[in-house]
Image: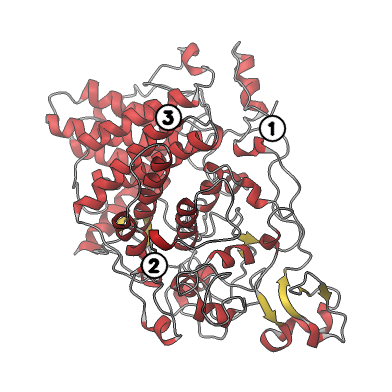
């Protein structure tokens, strides 16, 4: 019955989508007024508000996206960070102001620059849609809605408006803040210059406060509610709080947003509704996440209605042009809870695949295939986002994993992330004069995640749960940045292990002001793969066609190239084909430039649009 209801909702949403899109797909700034007879007659019942709001869902609750579209999807939508390596020269940061950074469409499918900024283009259609919804509720639905319904639907619109501003600010910094709906004849508003980041985010803060007070706690299965909103507030208030601390050195503003992140996280934690009760592969590969206590919001997929292709890219036959590098592998804690340099686990300092599976935190085994695979640029193949039946080197591969016909559900936002947001915000607040983190805090968050159940296949491979983290005996990582306290460092490690391939890593190193991690000159392990015995494990790489191509790096740094007769010596850290560091970059890449066309459009109307600092 539940699936049938979801199916009906999906069909209805898809049928109405063209109508919704026509309301915000005109020119970026010059949009017609919605005073047509359809607009006049639409706002007469609460169910129409629900339909109007449905368009936000596919844009902001992406999950695995749909069909072949991969923007913002888990894994394939986040392929630009210090976690992955590619063949040849690494993907470059933007080096010049683009001709255009705007859009006249509701989505920006396939734009390569999206991966660099992990956020939207210079597009305010979603803001306008939210403002329009607010206006129509306030002007056309008085007397139609109860006070409770009015407050709820205003909170829905204000949530999506604030959420989009969070994403826009993460990409551009200062952006125009549009307080309410306006006429295109009001050019002083239409062509307003960028509003300061602080003013925008203060407005976002206020909007989110309203949302947490007025959004319904329950509004039907798979609809936005107060718990879902709290989860996104937890994420984005942590982002802004740490940005203010590390980029602006503004302790007051950092505390404001970090406190709110803790508040939103506390709301979820104290609700008793959520738990860590599922192994990772079930969480990401399940055909149905209904009732899963870790999923605060998930996206349901169903054959013939809406499907995706992310799981197919996690099956061993498919190419992974970006694959996990040695740097992220070394971040995984050993099964005794220690960093590899200090671990007492036998062979903790060996980085071949089979040894890593046995000696590392269970999240390593849950994230990667248990055989080296030439389809992956660095041979370590990600399988986190598919169930146990999909990844295999020999047929048959289940038919649903051979195309864009995947139907496993996607956790859109999950309790595991909230626990990490919560403990990081508390640890950062402690550095700003707040209460110290306690062992109880660690047990409720990091150790809760370490107690995650293991599935049978992992247990059969010898995987065991990692011991609890103890405040009295934090790992002493010799590679820790000197400007990061020991506890914060271990919380960051926990995020990297837990959230690999999810919408986290690039945004994390940006908010921490650590994009230097993406420089091979500073972090050479980002350009290497794990330790391989090529002639034994993957002999295809020492065939005649690989002469002068296949390379490994010995422990002492010596690089050995296959010459046709030295196959036995091809043992070491694998170097992806023709791997080379990306060009150097400066701090200006933390934020995106505005396109020349957008600036020229303002100028043509007698207004000024300020360029992002550093990009003039």
Judged left or right of residue 293, residue 459 is: right
Element class at badge 1: loop
On residue 99, which mark appears? 1
User: Which colour scheme appears in the figure?
Assistant: secondary structure
Instruction: Please tell me in which quadrant of the rendered image residue 407 appears.
Output: bottom left
What residue appears at the point 27 percent right and 64 percent down from the top-left corner?
292
Q: Is residue 608 above or below residue 581?
A: above
Please name whichever residue, 405 or 370, is drawn nearer the observer in this view of the structure: 370
Real-space CA distance between mark 3 and mark 1, rounded to the nearest whole angstrom: 35 Å
Badge 2: few (under 14), some or many (20 or more) residues near its Cα, within 10 Å?
A: many
Quarter in which the N terminus is drawn: bottom left
Q: Which residue is mark 3?
A: 253
Percent position of residue 102, x then y: 58, 33
Q: Is residue 542 at least partly visible in the picture?
A: yes
Judged left or right of residue 261, residue 360 is: right
Asked if labels 2 and 3 touch by Cβ distance under 8 angstroms, the answer is: no
Q: How many marks?
A: 3
Q: Which residue is mark 2?
A: 408
Q: Is residue 55 at least partly visible in the picture?
A: no
Q: Earlier in the sequence, mark 3 or mark 1?
A: 1
What residue appears at the point 21 percent right and 51 percent down from the top-left corner?
270
Badge 3: few (under 14), some or many (20 or more) residues near its Cα, within 10 Å?
A: some
């Amino acid at each position: 019955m539940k699936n049938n209801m979801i199916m009906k909702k999906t069909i209805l949403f898809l049928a109405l989508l063209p109508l919704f899109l026509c309301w915000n797909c005109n020119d970026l700034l010059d949009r017609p007024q919605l005073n047509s007879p359809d607009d006049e007659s639409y706002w007469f019942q609460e169910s129409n508000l629900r339909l109007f709001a449905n368009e936000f869902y596919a844009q902001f609750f992406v999950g695995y996206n749909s069909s072949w579209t991969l923007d913002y999807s888990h894994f394939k939508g986040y392929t630009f960070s210090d976690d992955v390596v590619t063949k040849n020269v690494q993907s470059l940061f933007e080096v010049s102001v683009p001709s255009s950074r705007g859009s006249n469409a509701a989505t920006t499918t396939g734009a390569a620059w999206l991966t660099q900024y992990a956020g939207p283009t210079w597009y305010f259609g979603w803001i306008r849609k939210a403002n329009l919804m607010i206006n129509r509720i306030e002007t056309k639905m008085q007397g139609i809605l109860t006070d409770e319904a009015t407050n709820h639907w205003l909170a829905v619109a204000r949530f999506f408006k604030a959420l989009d501003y969070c994403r826009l600010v993460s990409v551009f910094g200062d952006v125009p803040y549009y307080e309410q709906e306006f006429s295109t004849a009001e050019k002083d508003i239409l062509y307003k210059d960028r509003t300061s980041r602080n003013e925008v985010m203060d407005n976002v803060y206020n909007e989110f406060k309203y949302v947490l007070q007025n959004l319904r706690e329950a509004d039907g299965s798979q609809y936005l509610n107060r718990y879902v909103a709290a989860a996104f507030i937890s994420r984005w208030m942590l982002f802004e709080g740490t940005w203010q601390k590390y980029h602006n050195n503004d302790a007051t503003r950092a505390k404001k947003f970090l406190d709110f992140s803790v508040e939103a996280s506390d709301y979820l934690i104290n609700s008793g509704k959520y738990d860590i009760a599922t192994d990772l592969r079930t969480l990401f590969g399940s055909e149905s996440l209904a009732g899963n206590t870790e999923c605060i919001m998930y996206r349901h997929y169903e054959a013939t209605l809406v499907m995706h292709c992310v799981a197919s890219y996690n099956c061993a036959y498919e190419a992974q042009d970006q694959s996990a590098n040695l740097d992220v592998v070394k971040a995984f804690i050993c099964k005794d809870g220690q960093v590899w340099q200090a671990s007492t686990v036998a062979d903790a300092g060996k980085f071949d695949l089979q040894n890593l599976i046995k000696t590392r935190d269970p999240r390593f085994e849950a994230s990667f295939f248990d055989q080296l695979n030439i389809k992956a640029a660095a041979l370590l193949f990600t399988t986190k986002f598919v169930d146990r039946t999909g990844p295999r080197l020999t047929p048959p591969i289940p038919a649903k994993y051979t195309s864009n016909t995947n139907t496993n559900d996607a956790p859109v936002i999950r309790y595991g992330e909230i626990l990490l947001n919560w403990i990081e915000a508390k640890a950062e607040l402690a550095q700003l004069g707040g209460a110290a983190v306690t062992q109880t805090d660690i047990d409720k968050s990091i150790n809760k995640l370490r107690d995650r159940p293991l599935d049978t296949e992992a247990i059969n491979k010898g995987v065991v749960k990692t011991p609890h983290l103890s405040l009295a005996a934090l790992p002493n990582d010799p590679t820790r940045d000197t400007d990061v306290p020991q506890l914060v460092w271990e919380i960051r490690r926990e995020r990297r292990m837990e959230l690999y391939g999810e919408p986290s890593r690039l945004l994390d190193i940006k908010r921490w002001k650590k994009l230097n991690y993406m420089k091979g000159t500073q972090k050479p392990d980002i350009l290497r793969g794990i330790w391989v015995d090529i002639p034994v494990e993957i002999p295809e790489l020492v065939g005649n066609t690989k002469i002068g191509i296949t390379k490994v790096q010995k422990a002492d740094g010596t690089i050995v190239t296959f010459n046709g007769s030295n196959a036995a010596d091809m043992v070491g850290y694998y170097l992806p084909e023709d791997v080379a560091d990306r060009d150097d970059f400066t701090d200006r890449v933390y934020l995106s430039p505005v396109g020349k066309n957008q600036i020229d459009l303002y100028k043509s109307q007698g207004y000024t649009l300020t360029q992002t600092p550093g990009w003039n």
